[in-house]
């Protein structure tokens, strides 16, 4: 950029710097203003660029970018190129549902993604259930998995999507190695694969056998010494012993085969297993290697915690009114900030109307959607870390309304020591709705239920979490729509002997596994304090 | 972007029965919602006038405070945003005079007035523009989509993107410039289409 540039270029260069969000040096700012003063026709372009910078900042801040940096060279020409075989096949021969899926994949640019990345990523971890990994660092949901990576579970299950389109679930104890985007070595344990049309050829090798998929769902189990069981659930596979050049054997649905440790076909017997569910098609589409799934993109916004007048500020640890979209700090570990997926959570002014008695909470609520079909194990959540650990008696309150409530729906406000995305918080003190009724629990085994809740009815819950003769939280009292004034008898109490939690550092809201994508939990006026009056001011609203 | 200094929630003040028990159309609540909803427009307006990021944030905070202080002067029968822009314009002017007084750069008040008038007109449709932008981002060519999401989604600076892609900062900056221009064109066309739908 030099002063000798012709006007349009010089103006564009100055404006680009400004509209990128940078401060111009004084001399450049003066030059830009001088150009605007002498050429009023440039004002529209000036405003358009500045405006779009702010709109994009507002709209996209905090969302996760693609994992792969853009190549500026590629900006000069349209991104296109030969499609991998799977994409061509899906687009050309697939039935209607697959044609839609293929279109989605193509539109999303999935198949061109890998060539841009330097990492030899061949798969993505979709989700886990109660997974205890053998490796010291647990892969996170959505983590990219590289060629040669070993997945070893002591227990639980882990679902993986391969970049060639197939997916599988591993059940611990097990060990498997990713050999390529369509090949896995199962060393021990159970694997169930789902291989959609277009991804045929997915291969599982074991010490005793090689199993080549022909478009199917199948299970493989490797036991002591490498003996391998194969069972086809749908479609067909070809399996052959690795110890010989024998012709592969074709197995169709409901057929099983056993290879002993020497690779000999020993007998056909069913797998005596409750098989875990492999990834579903919509999961494989949503969890695209190389791009962070929408459900995992996290937005971080600063907590407001400005107590309304009339409430004692000193006693409040949390006082969130969900106003507008406040500070965006895209650092996931920021203290006193809310974390959520913008795909699932609507904050402040964009949330639907919420009226509690005479209190209009328009623009001061957060709306959390039910779970989408592509992420059945992700508890759509909203969570934050507290400024410091809390280990004493607390009171809390919030106003909520659940739209679309049915018997299978579930949500809780929980108090815990983590807000990791794979945490279930099932052992944490929680208050919410379960089976259509108000729930208070201190652990999964100790749940108390209150009155039935009507779909779409706003309620205020006030709670007291405390310790009784223990150094752990073991008492939880809940009031439902309590009147103004001092605390009456609670409507609901839960208690355990001993308890699990001595202190908590996080709180959050999570939606249940069986909620529907159309469900909406609206929540407002969330408060956490030391005393009843901190969270439920005399007179109420 | 720093937090808008929104006023306290007067509606939940238990000491004030008239506010506490007011109907859903309580004017203060509605006013808070208007201020909140106007933040993207006001920031754009102030950015066009004040330009430096920290100054823009300060001016926005000051504007929000003044808007709250003047809430009783607002006539709810009239559109909110033009009125808010009038307040923001005065804050921007005061801020410029205060913050640039040592820079010997005389404020061109005629140009300031021209930009303020044009910016006020431009931001009138910010909410609709945001809606259209969501549609346009879906259509943005992949070659622009990635760089836009790195800049605005991940908040990476132009220099960081340039370093990571081994390109010059100027090349990255101009790519972003073209992406914003393309999005602007798309937003304009989309709004035009909606207005005739």
Image (spheres, coloured by chain):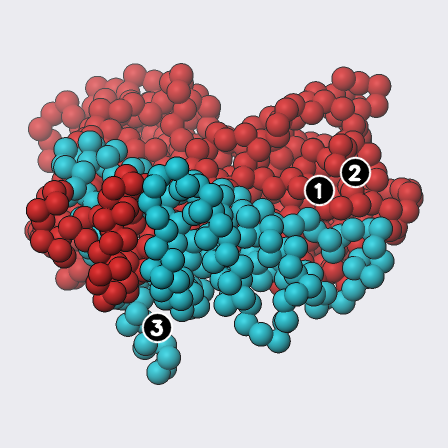
Chain colours: A red, B cyan
Label 1 to label 2: alpha-carbon separation: 8 Å
Q: Residue at x 65, y 39 (%)?
A: A305
Q: Residue at x 43, y 47 (%)?
A: B96
Quadrant, the C terminus of chain B: bottom left
Q: Residue at x 69, y 25 (%)?
A: A390
Q: Which residue is mark 1?
A: A307
Secondary structure beneath disc 2? loop
Q: Which of the two discs, 1 and 2, labels the residue nearer the N terminus?
A: 1
Q: Is residue A189 visible?
A: yes
Q: Residues within 10 Å of mark 1 (few under 14, many from 20)?
A: many
Cβ atoms under marks 1 and 2 closer than 8 Å: yes
Label 3 to label 1: alpha-carbon separation: 40 Å
Q: Chain of mark 1?
A: A
List x then y, in percent, for residue A518: 52, 60
Q: Residues within 10 Å of mark 2 (few under 14, many from 20)?
A: some
- Same chain under badges 3 and 2? The reply is no
Is A198 displayed left or right of A431 in the figure? left
List x then y, in percent, for residue A269: 35, 35
Q: Which residue is mark 2?
A: A312
Q: Chain of mark 3?
A: B
Q: Residues within 10 Å of mark 3 (few under 14, many from 20)?
A: some
- Residue A158's place in the image compared with B176, above or below, is above
Which quadrant holds residue A494? top right
List x then y, in percent, for residue A435: 68, 51
């Amino acid at each position: 950029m030099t002063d000798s540039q012709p006007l349009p270029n010089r103006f564009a260069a100055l404006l680009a710097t400004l509209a990128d969000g940078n401060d111009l040096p004084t001399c450049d700012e003066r030059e830009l203003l001088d150009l605007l003063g002498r050429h009023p026709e440039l004002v529209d372009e000036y405003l358009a660029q500045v405006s779009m910078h702010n709109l994009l900042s507002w709209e996209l801040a905090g969302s996760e970018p693609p994992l792969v940096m853009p190549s500026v060279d590629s900006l000069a020409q349209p991104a296109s190129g030969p499609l991998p075989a799977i994409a061509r096949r899906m687009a050309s021969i697939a039935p209607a549902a697959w044609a839609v899926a293929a279109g989605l994949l193509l539109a999303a640019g999935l198949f061109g993604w890998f060539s841009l990345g330097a990492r030899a990523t061949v798969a993505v971890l979709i989700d886990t259930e109660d997974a205890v990994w053998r490796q010291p660092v647990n892969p996170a949901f959505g983590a990219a998995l590289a060629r040669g990576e070993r997945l070893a579970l002591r227990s639980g299950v882990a679902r993986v999507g391969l970049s060639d389109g197939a997916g599988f679930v591993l059940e611990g104890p097990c060990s498997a190695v990713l050999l390529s985007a369509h090949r896995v070595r199962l060393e021990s344990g159970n694997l169930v694969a789902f291989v959609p049309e277009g991804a045929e050829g997915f291969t599982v090798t074991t010490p005793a056998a090689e199993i080549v998929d022909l478009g199917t769902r199948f299970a493989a189990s490797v036991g002591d010494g490498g003996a391998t069981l194969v069972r086809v659930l749908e479609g067909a596979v070809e399996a052959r012993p690795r110890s010989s050049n024998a012709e592969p054997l074709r197995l169709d649905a409901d057929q099983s085969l056993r290879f002993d440790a020497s690779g000999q076909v020993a007998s056909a017997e069913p797998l005596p297993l409750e098989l875990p569910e492999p990834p579903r098609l919509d999961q494989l589409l949503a969890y695209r290697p190389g791009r962070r799934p929408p459900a995992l993109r996290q937005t971080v916004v600063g907590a407001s915690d400005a107590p309304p007048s009339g409430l004692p500020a000193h006693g409040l640890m949390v006082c969130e009114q969900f106003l507008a979209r406040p500070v965006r700090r895209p650092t996931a570990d920021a203290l006193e900030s809310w974390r959520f997926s913008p795909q699932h959570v609507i904050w402040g002014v964009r949330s639907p109307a919420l009226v509690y008695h005479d209190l209009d909470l328009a623009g001061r609520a957060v709306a959390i959607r039910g779970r989408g079909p592509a992420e059945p194990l992700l508890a759509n959540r909203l969570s934050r870390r507290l400024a410091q650990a809390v280990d004493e008696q607390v009171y809390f309150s919030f106003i909520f309304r659940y739209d679309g409530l049915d018997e299978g729906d579930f949500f809780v406000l929980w108090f815990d020591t983590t807000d990791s995305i794979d945490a279930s918080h099932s052992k944490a003190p929680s208050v919410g709705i379960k089976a259509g009724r108000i729930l208070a629990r201190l652990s999964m085994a100790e749940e108390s239920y209150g009155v039935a809740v009507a779909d779409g009815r706003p309620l205020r819950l006030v709670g007291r979490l405390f310790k009784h003769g223990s150094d752990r939280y073991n008492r939880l009292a809940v009031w439902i729509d309590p009147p103004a004034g001092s605390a009456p008898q609670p409507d609901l109490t839960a208690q355990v002997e001993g308890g699990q939690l001595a202190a908590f550092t996080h709180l959050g809201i999570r939606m249940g596994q069986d909620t529907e994508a159309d469900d909406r939990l609206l929540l407002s006026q969330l408060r956490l304090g030391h005393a009843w009056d901190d969270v439920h001011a005399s007179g109420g609203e | 972007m720093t937090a808008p200094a929104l006023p306290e929630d007067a509606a939940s003040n238990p000491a004030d029965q008239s506010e506490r028990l007011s109907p859903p159309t309580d004017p203060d609540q509605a006013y808070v919602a208007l201020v909140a909803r106007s933040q993207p427009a006001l920031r754009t307006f102030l950015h066009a006038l004040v330009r430096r990021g920290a100054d823009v944030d300060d001016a926005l905070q000051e504007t929000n405070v003044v808007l709250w202080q003047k809430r009783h002067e607002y006539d709810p029968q009239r559109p909110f945003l033009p009125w808010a822009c009038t307040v923001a314009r005065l804050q921007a002017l005061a801020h410029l005079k205060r913050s640039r007084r040592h820079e010997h750069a005389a404020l061109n008040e005629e140009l300031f007035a021209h930009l303020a008038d044009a910016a006020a007109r431009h931001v009138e449709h910010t909410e609709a523009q945001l809606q259209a932008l969501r549609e346009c981002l879906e259509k943005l060519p992949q070659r622009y989509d990635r760089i836009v999401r790195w800049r605005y989604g991940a908040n990476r600076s132009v220099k960081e993107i340039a370093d990571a892609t081994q390109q010059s900062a100027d090349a990255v900056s101009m790519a972003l410039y073209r992406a914003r221009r393309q999005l602007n064109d798309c937003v304009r066309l989309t709004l035009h289409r909606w207005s005739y739908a």
